[in-house]
Amino acid sequence: MSKVIYVLNGPNLNLLGVRQPEVYGRETLADIQAMLEQSARESGFTIEFFQSNHEGAIVDKIHEAREKAAGIIINPAAYTHTSVAILDALNTFDAPVVEVHISNVHKRESFRHHSYVSLRADGVIAGLGTRGYLAALDYLTHQLS
Ligand code: DHK
């Protein structure tokens, strides 16, 4: 079985660390990638880390994951609340999916309370900051070992 976990990040997450730090914190996406790569290595897994500001590019990466990934961690960012295309793509993926949000979307504007991706996700983590990615990875590595 594949030992690769895909970590997919949606729009504006390339600006983590400088974008609204009071909401998203001061860690960068590169910091998250390094943290996950180390944790994955300790569990005998590898990470394929990806960010795009483009919906179709995320759909394409999920299609790639169908052949290559043992699980997906996805923070679809704003596409969480709008993208039937990302939901449909995830519905073609047969292994575990964990949805992560850095902020607690339920404490924020009402348009952030609905997630298309949650209709597919096996688990949802929100509001734990960047530690949410680590919690998702911990869940997947235990599920898949
Ligand atoms: C990130 C975003 O960019 C927002 O559009 C989502 C999510 C929340 C987060 O908390 O990681 O609403």
Image (cartoon, rainbow, N blue to C red):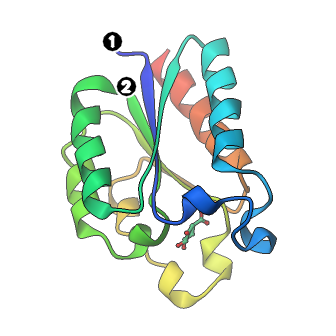
Instruction: Residue at 40%, 32% (x, y): give it.
Output: 71
Coordinates of residue 28 in the picture (x, y in percent): 70, 50
**Location of residue 34 in the rendering, given as x and y in whole percent from the top left corner:** 68, 31
Q: Are marks 2 and 1 in contact (CB under 8 Å)?
A: yes
Which residue carries the number 1 mark? 1
Q: Looking at the picture, does residue 110 appear above or below residue 101? A: below
From mark 2 to mark 1, how far is it between C-alphas?
Answer: 7 Å
Q: Nearer the viewer, residue 140 or 54?
A: 54
Please name the residue shown 74% across and 59% down the image.
17
Which residue is located at x 29 percent, y 43 percent? Answer: 61
Query: Given the image, on which type of amino acid does mark 2 rest?
Result: Ala
Q: Quadrant of ligand 1?
A: bottom right
Q: Quadrant of the N terminus?
A: top left
Disc count in the image? Answer: 2
User: Badge 2 local density, few (<14 within 10 Å), some, or many (20+)?
Assistant: many
Q: Quadrant of residue 32?
A: top right
Tell which of 118 and 20 is nearer to you.
20
Task: Tell me: 67 left or right of 114.
Answer: left
Left or right: residue 83 versus residue 18 is left
Residue 48 appearing in the image: yes
Which residue corresponds to mark 2?
70
For numbered disc 2, what is the local secondary structure?
loop
Q: What crowding class fits label 1: few (fewer than 14 Cα within 10 Å), some (14-19), or many (20 or more)? A: few
Q: Quadrant of residue 18?
A: bottom right
Residue 94 visible in the shown view: no
Q: Residue at x 30, y 70 (%)?
A: 83
Amino acid type at mark 1 = Met
Mark 1 vs ligand 1: CB under 8 Å? Answer: no
